[in-house]
Amino acid sequence: MAFMIAQRAFLKLYLIKMVEDRRGYGYQMLDDLKAEFKPLGYTPPQSEIYRALHELVQEGILFRTKKLKGNDPSVDFQEIVLYHFTSDGKEKAALYRKQIKTDLDRCLGILHKAEHDNFGYTS
Amino acid sequence: MAFMIAQRAFLKLYLIKMVEDRRGYGYQMLDDLKAEFKPLGYTPPQSEIYRALHELVQEGILFRTKKLKGNDPSVDFQEIVLYHFTSDGKEKAALYRKQIKTDLDRCLGILHKAEHDNFGYTS
DNA sequence: TCATGAACACACTGTTCATTT
DNA sequence: AAATGAACAGTGTGTTCATGA
């Protein structure tokens, strides 16, 4: 097992949630995540978002539809890709989330121990 | 900047501390760390310990001496490598620790947010 | 510029192998 | 088996480039 949780897995967790909340397409989710994490000193790179999305499709959790962004085709021809859960996608996602939670807790345990051991928190 | 703290940096932090405490040589430190982290589901690999140690030497923080392990050379010829701080090693180490602490806190912030956002802790 | 995707290069890491005692 | 080190292979990641609307 790897030392820390992978960025890919971390992002998938958020992307699953965002698709649940119908938060739209890749670029939008990227922007949202960038804004959310900026104060924490983390800027999710564009490539990872798309790769994570592609993997979720490959794993049969999500599927894609395409749509024009604007409502008026004569004005806006920008095509965007929307994501939705497959028939058994929600179950698969639940399982995946469970696995990630385990890994997340493992990482937190390790990092907390490091704080305690090296920078002396008593609690 | 990378997503999570690197294993190498994480281990250097512990190795610096262990050299401060005169906790001996590589293999011993490896064993100690393995035992310490086993309950947390992390097993530091041998290669990373040595690589981390080599880097600390390269960076001018530590230097090496060699010694026979046993006190009786007629019985035990096992040679071990001991590590010590260079003349300005402690200062350099302090600086390094400071940097790692920043990164550690950044990682904890990110992971805590993920716990909160995805698995709903209110505190 | 928005939106998606792919290519490329590289650092980090895990496993294995080598060597000596 | 203890101890150190190096080689090798593979994955994840960041940057850059490409494309269309």
Image: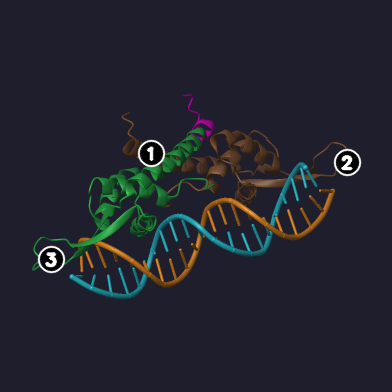
Chain colours: A brown, B green, C cyan, D orange
Q: On what subunit does the disc labeled 1 rest? A: A
Q: Is residue A109 left or right of residue D4?
A: right
Distance of label 3 from label 1 (alpha carbons)? 39 Å
For mark 1, what is the residue?
A: A109
Residue B71 is one of the magenta-drawn residues? no
Query: What is the spatial separation of the Cα atoms under label 3 and label 2, in whole angstroms?
Result: 83 Å
Residue D3 in the image: state x and y as whole percent.
24, 61
Query: Which residue is rendered at x = 39% and y = 47% of the image?
Result: B10
- Read off the magenta span: B114-123
Chain name for mark 2: A
Q: Is residue A62 above or below residue A20?
A: below
How far apart in space, not on screen, are marks 1 and 2 (Cα)?
Answer: 52 Å
Cβ atoms at labels 1 and 2 below 8 Å apart: no
Q: Position of residue A54 (x, y in %)?
A: 64, 51
Question: Viewer-nearest of labels 3 and 1?
Answer: 3
For residue B118, say whether it is visible: yes
Q: Chain of mark 3?
A: B
Q: Which residue is mark 2?
A: A73
Q: Which residue is mark 3?
A: B76
The residue depicted at 40 percent of the width and 40 percent of the height is A111
Element type where label 3 sits in the image: loop
Q: Is residue A121 above or below residue B32?
A: above
Label 3: few (<14), some (14–19) or many (≥20) C-alpha neighbours in 10 Å: few
Which of the numbered marks, if any, corresponds to residue A78?
none
Mark 2, residues whose alpha carbon is within 10 Å: few (<14), some, or many (≥20)? few
Crowdedness of circle 1 by 10 Å Cα count: few (<14), some, many (20+)?
A: some
Query: Hey, what amino acid is under mark 3?
Result: Asp
**Residue at the (57%, 33%) spot, across then down:** A39
Callouts 3 and 1 in the same chain: no
